[in-house]
Amino acid sequence: MMKLGVLTSGGDAPGMNAAIRAVVKTADYHNIEVMGIEGGYQGLIEGKLHRLTSTDVDYIADKGGTFLKTSRCAEFMKESGRIKALSILKDYGINHLVVIGGEGSFKGTQKLHELGVNVIGIPATIDNDLSYTDYSLGFDTTLNTILECLGKIKDTDLSHEKTTIVEVMGRYCGDLALYSALAGAGEIISTPERKLSFEEICSKLNEKIKSGKKDNLILITEKMYDIQDLQKYVEDRLDVSVRTSILGFIQRGGQPSAFDRILASKMGITAVELLLKGYSGRAVGIKENDLINVDIEKVHSKLSSNDDKYSLLDTILA
Ligand code: F6P
């Protein structure tokens, strides 16, 4: 008899709720009992589980965050934490698990798979930093949120003929900045994959100003530089006053886009169906519009420089 657990782990991402909904509804359809695990792996270790039925997830698909709550759980990274988690799963008779999260969460999923639990991962992180899938849940919504913010900053930059340096999230992946610029917001971008020095940013900005363009958005991925140092560097060298804006956690919340909701539904259904077919230790993804699943052990952070997309950018930002 199959009994399924579902949890969300790591940073919350819009679309997580839609994925939970799809998992629970699909399980219900197949008469599988589902337990919702609250607060990710931490909640699992602490035994925070409760029964979830279809009606419990009726009104969550359009909500940001995760109604199951989440955590970044250091204890689960240790063997002792995983042993505790395993014994809770045994106590509840849960032999199948769907984990909705990013790369760090999938490492835990892999460990549970090695311990004999049947597990499937659904990728959810606004950073879009997983190499095996074109999109992770949350990325599209966050991208749209960023574009909305950049549009507002552009209104005031245009009115005052000002330049603003905007820092966006992404951890060590530049996709949020890259795709924002591809979508038409941002004159100069610097990402971990294509990191510009202060000098290079300054010289690109100088060229724009000399050509008559005085409103310029400089998009940078977080964790690369101190945005105030960059502002000072530019102001010291060019005769401009520069604004700065760190978009921060506004990027992580909000109603998931249609794209994220639909993708979440497809991935949630697929995860349960894979478990029903006897698969374990797999991560669901999407590649060139096809749903795929890969060995979760082979899931890594993106290291590629997204060359094709950067060359598109070189053309339109030249
Ligand atoms: O992984 C999602 C993300 O929002 C990153 O973009 C960011 O660097 C990080 O999480 C922030 O993490 P925390 O919520 O732990 O501060």
Image: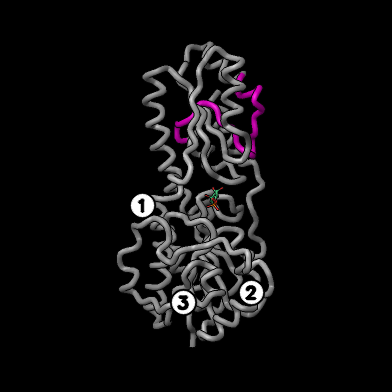
> Does residue 185 belong to the magenta stretch?
yes
Q: Residue at x 60, y 45 (%)?
A: 173
Query: Residue 178 at x, y = what percent?
Result: 54, 37
Picture layout, residue 306 above or below residue 129: above
> Does residue 311 belong to the magenta stretch?
no
Q: Which image quarter is the C terminus in? A: top right
147 vs 44, nearest the viewer: 44
230 vs 269, nearest the viewer: 230
Residue under numbered circle 3: 49
**Quick one: label 3, few (<14), some, or many (20+) residues within 10 Å?**
many
Residue under numbered circle 2: 82
Query: Residue 28 at x, y = what percent?
Result: 38, 78
Asked if ligand 1 lies within 8 A of label 2, the reply is no
Q: Earlier in the sequence, mark 3 or mark 2?
A: 3
Picture layout, residue 15 above or below residue 148: below
- Left or right of 12? Residue 57 is left
Q: Earlier in the sequence, mark 3 or mark 1?
A: 3
Q: Identify the secondary structure beneath mark 2.
A: helix
Nearest-to-viewer mark from 3 and 1 = 3
Residue type (three-letter) at the residue carrying disc 2? Arg
**Quick one: label 1, few (<14), some, or many (20+) residues within 10 Å?**
some
Query: Residue 184 at x, y = what percent?
Result: 45, 31
Residue under numbered circle 1: 255
Quote the CA–CA distance across marks 2 and 1: 33 Å
Query: Residue 104 at x, y = what percent?
Result: 61, 60
Q: Residue at x 40, y 68 (%)?
A: 22
